[in-house]
Image (cartoon, rainbow, N blue to C red):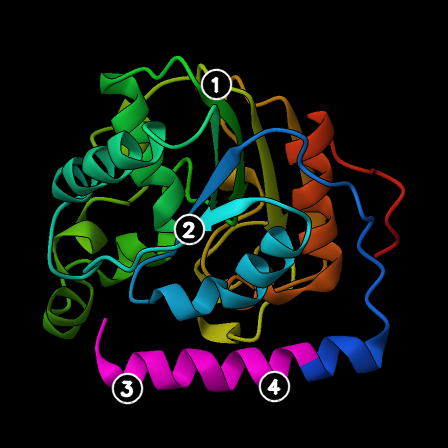
Amino acid sequence: MDTREIRLQKFYKRCIIYLLSSLFWTTPTVYAKKPETIVLLHGLGRTSLSMYLLKIQLENIGYTVVSEGYASTDGSIKEHADWLDKLINDCSRKSEKIHFVTHSLGGIILRFHLKIKKYPNMGRVVMLSPPNKGSQVADFLRDWSLFKLLMGPSGQEIGTGPGSIPNKLGPVEFELGVITGDVSFNPFTSLLIPGPDDGKVSVENARVKGMKDFIVMPHSHTFIMNSPEVIDQVILFLQTGHFLHTVKK
């Protein structure tokens, strides 16, 4: 992590704490009872800063939170999974249980890795806006030179075809809750996506066989992890294994 990112994190933390204090955050104070770690995995083209608000809230209720950045646009999903294996092994030496909260591509990386390796201290997983059946936007842009340059190999691997990585992974075999959005700020990409979508992924394509719970919330793909209501749902699933389905849209 470079000096600039450290300074930005400190600045964001001060701003966020002030903002949350002024808004009277209502997250239930359900504290982790055992040494448990939550690993956060950001999405394609993002950094660990995108998960920072979520990180603060999880730490505030007693979890150890690991939010490491990875070069999402510079490697394949397999290469990212190899990196994740080393991170999980390090966390396993320090924690009785490891949970995961992922955004977008982060969920596919985790699914890929957990098809190869199992962990005895595996906890629950919450995926935010995952392209579990691929993304039509990736289908449309995959042959564009600029898309290849900006999104790298991983951007080529998350299409909706039967040969795409998301569609070759099969049902999940861990305790999973999926939160996705149905608000888009990009009418162009939404034209490419059938049915309700979050601007990048359709609601239907966020689903995956084997998931334990699923909820749609009124947020966009890019900013879903920053919503107080979404963070409340993340915490609830990590603690209980289910979402609260009386949330008003």
Q: Left of 143 or right of it: where is 196?
A: right
Residue highlighted by disc 2: 104
Residue 70 horizontal side relative to residue 99, left or right: left
Work out whether mark 3 precedes mark 2 in sequence or the reverse, and give the earlier one.
Answer: 3
In reply to whether residue 14 is colored magenta, the answer given is: yes
Residue type indicated by callout 2: Ser
Secondary structure category for the residue under label 2: loop
224 in relation to 159, above or below: below
Examine the rendered structure and indicate whether residue 245 appears above or below residue 48: above
**What residue is shown at x 44% (from left), y 14% (from top)?**
173
Mark pair 4, 1: CA separation? 36 Å
* Separation of residues labelled 1 and 2 (CA atoms): 18 Å
Residue to which mark 3 is pinned? 4
Examine the image and state in which quarter residue 249 appears. bottom right
Label 3 sits on a secondary structure element that is: helix
Q: Amino acid at mark 1?
A: Phe
Where does label 4 land, which residue? 15
**Residue in view at x 33 percent, y 67 percent:** 47
Q: In the rendered structure, which amino acid carries the disc numbered 3?
A: Arg
- The amino acid marked with disc number 4 is Cys
Q: What span is in magenta?
A: 1-17
Q: Residue 224: x, y in percent?
A: 59, 61
Q: Residue at x 34, y 49 (%)?
A: 105
Query: Residue 8's spot in the image, x, y percent?
Result: 40, 84
